[in-house]
């Protein structure tokens, strides 16, 4: 038995090496997306602390988009943002600033803001309007923002609470959809 040990030693060593290699491969390999294909597990790129500027030279409009983190997923062409900030400035129109906890950008450029969404519209000479909600869908191609969630709008001496809202940035018209409560305080 002892005499056959030198001939079996290389075989035992090869088996141990194969087991170690298999274990090492399973340990360092990232987990697969599994059957559900959850895209949030494996983004094709990640950008931290970024800012992008879009300028329309024909009409002088510009938009700034920034976020603490951006993740893009190739399989559904969706972009996820953490702590997004959006500034929309067009000549002759009030400057609009938007912030939220997170956002999704779809492949057709729609923006879905979620968590502590705050919109600030500042118009020189007319003061500012603040809108707070938990969800906001922005359609940049149509200059429309809308939500079906509770929304609070504050402007000068007025506080408006409603459920659901549509805002057309071209016409500056806000349409409140339901359960509207309006408070106007002259002393405020």
Image (tube, rainbow, N blue to C red):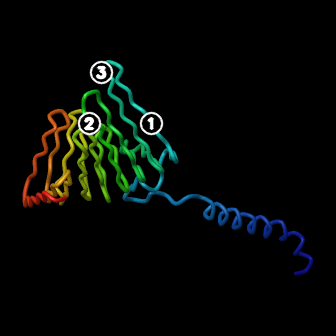
Does label 3 or label 1 sit earlier along the sequence?
Answer: 1
Does label 3 or label 2 sit earlier along the sequence?
Answer: 3
Q: Assign the C terminus to one quadrant of the image.
A: bottom left
Q: Which residue is mark 2?
A: 94
Q: Assign the N terminus to one quadrant of the image.
A: bottom right
Compared with 96, 7 (above or below) is below
Q: Which residue is mark 3?
A: 59
Distance from Cα at disc 1 to Cα at disc 2: 20 Å
Marks 3 and 2 close (CB-CB < 8 Å) = no
Task: Determine the secondary structure under disc 1.
Answer: strand
Residue 47 at x, y percent in the picture: 51, 45
Residue 145 at x, y percent in the picture: 21, 44
Q: Is residue 14 visible?
A: yes
The one nearer the camera, 47 or 186, is: 186
Q: Residue at x 25, y 39 (%)?
A: 123
Compared with 56, 28 (above or below) is below
Distance from Cα at disc 3 to Cα at disc 1: 19 Å
Residue 108 located left or right of residue 53: left
Does label 1 or label 2 sit earlier along the sequence?
Answer: 1
Residue 160 located left or right of residue 101: left
Distance from Cα at disc 3 to Cα at disc 2: 15 Å
Marks 3 and 1 close (CB-CB < 8 Å) = no
Residue 82 located left or right of residue 119: right
Q: Which residue is mark 1?
A: 52
The one nearer the camera, 32 or 10, is: 32
Task: Determine the secondary structure under disc 2.
Answer: loop
Q: Residue at x 48, y 52 (%)?
A: 42
| Mark 3 vs mark 1: in front | 3
Q: Residue at x 16, y 57 (%)?
A: 159
């Amino acid at each position: 038995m002892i005499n056959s040990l030198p001939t079996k030693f290389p075989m035992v060593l090869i088996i141990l090496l194969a087991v170690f290699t298999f274990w090492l491969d399973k340990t360092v390999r990232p987990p697969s997306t599994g059957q559900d294909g959850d895209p949030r597990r494996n983004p094709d790129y990640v950008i931290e602390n970024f800012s992008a500027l879009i300028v329309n030279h024909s009409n002088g409009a510009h938009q700034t988009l920034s976020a603490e983190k951006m993740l893009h997923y190739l399989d559904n062409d969706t972009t996820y943002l953490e702590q997004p900030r959006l500034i929309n400035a067009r000549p002759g129109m009030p400057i609009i600033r938007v912030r939220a906890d997170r956002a999704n950008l779809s492949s057709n450029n729609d923006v879905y803001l979620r968590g502590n969404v705050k919109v600030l519209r500042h118009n020189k000479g007319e003061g500012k309007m603040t809108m707070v909600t938990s969800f906001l869908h922005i359609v940049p191609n149509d200059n429309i923002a809308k939500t079906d969630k509770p929304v609070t709008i504050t402007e000068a001496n007025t506080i408006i609470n409603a459920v659901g809202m549509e805002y057309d940035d071209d016409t500056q018209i806000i349409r409140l959809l339901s359960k509207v409560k309006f408070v106007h305080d002259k002393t405020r």
